[in-house]
Image (cartoon, helix red, strand yellow):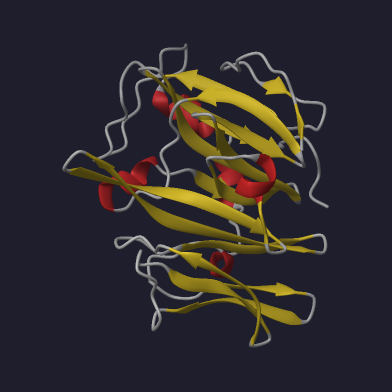
Amino acid sequence: MSGVSTPMPSATPWVLPSGLSIEEHPLAKVPETDEMILHPLDNLNQEQMLAKHADEFQKSLPYESYYGLCFCTIWAMQGNAKLETMYDSDTPTPDHKILAGVTRDGKIIFSTLNAPPGTTNQFRVLATYDNHWVLELAEEKQVQTGQIFTYSFLGKIFVDGKSLNELYGYDESFGFQTIHDRPFYFYKRNGKIGVSYDGREIPLSYDLVPHYGCCSGGQLNPRMAQNIVAFFGVRGEQWNYVEIGVFNSPNP
């Protein structure tokens, strides 16, 4: 996994040699999630900011391969074979983990222990690109400080059964999708969040990118489409609305 040393992006598009474009809009305050009201600090109002790439969000990703509201399996085709998520909740471990994995035409090809979140689906993505398959799981993490327990959801991405967290020393990895048919995801290492595109890391140095939220908190989750993702990135107390995509290349 190679890295890219980058300046901070801005509302003016910053385009990588790969064709990936990054546009970051600083916000005056935290988004108002009830009606999703944003307060840009640059020269655009909310309507102008969201209109620029609105057409890109009409090109949706395969619904069956990405998280749905139900606590159900998701699936993807790899050639003529059907990949599908599976779990075994009958034999939980003492730390409340269960087996979660992937089947190919009904036969298990991968499984791992996972602590499923209680309020949202543990299966986030099951997708394919080139000759690879990708599984993304959300896992509940419990941290005890004295007598206080706090809970959070962390992401784990597996490519062909190999953990990206273990391979690259990530605290977590999440938000997998393909952009212009190349793999894209968020990663967190040493407390800082960046993105990876087509095998190259882009260290954007966010302290927070909300994800895996449910109910009203879900309004802050990344919004994905075929060639673009929109999300909120926070550095310190500064919230930013960010759009990343490949916009000037024809679809393959």
- Residue 100: image x %, image y %? 51, 72
Is 129 positioned to the left or the right of 158 in the image?
right
- Residue 172: image x %, image y %? 53, 44
Q: Nearer the viewer, residue 230 or 169?
A: 169
The residue at the far left in this view is 147
**Tally of numbered tags:** 0
Placement of 124 over or under 4, stated as above or below: below
Dividing the image into 4 quarters, which one contains the N terminus?
top right
Please identify the quarter of the rendering in which residue 82 is found: bottom right
Q: Which residue is located at x 31 percent, y 31 percent?
A: 37
Is 138 positioned to the left or the right of 60 in the image?
left
- Residue 239: image x %, image y %? 40, 22
Q: Which residue is located at x 77 percent, y 41 percent?
A: 199
Is 125 positioned to the left or the right of 219 in the image?
right
Is 199 positioned to the left or the right of 50 in the image?
right
Q: Nearer the viewer, residue 114 or 121?
A: 114
Q: Which residue is located at x 73 percent, y 24 percent?
A: 15
Placement of 239 over or under 244, stated as above or below: above
- Residue 44: image x %, image y %? 46, 17
Q: Nearer the viewer, residue 43 or 15?
A: 15
Please identify the quarter of the rendering in which residue 90 is found: bottom left
Q: Is residue 189 visible?
A: yes
Q: Is residue 52 visible?
A: no
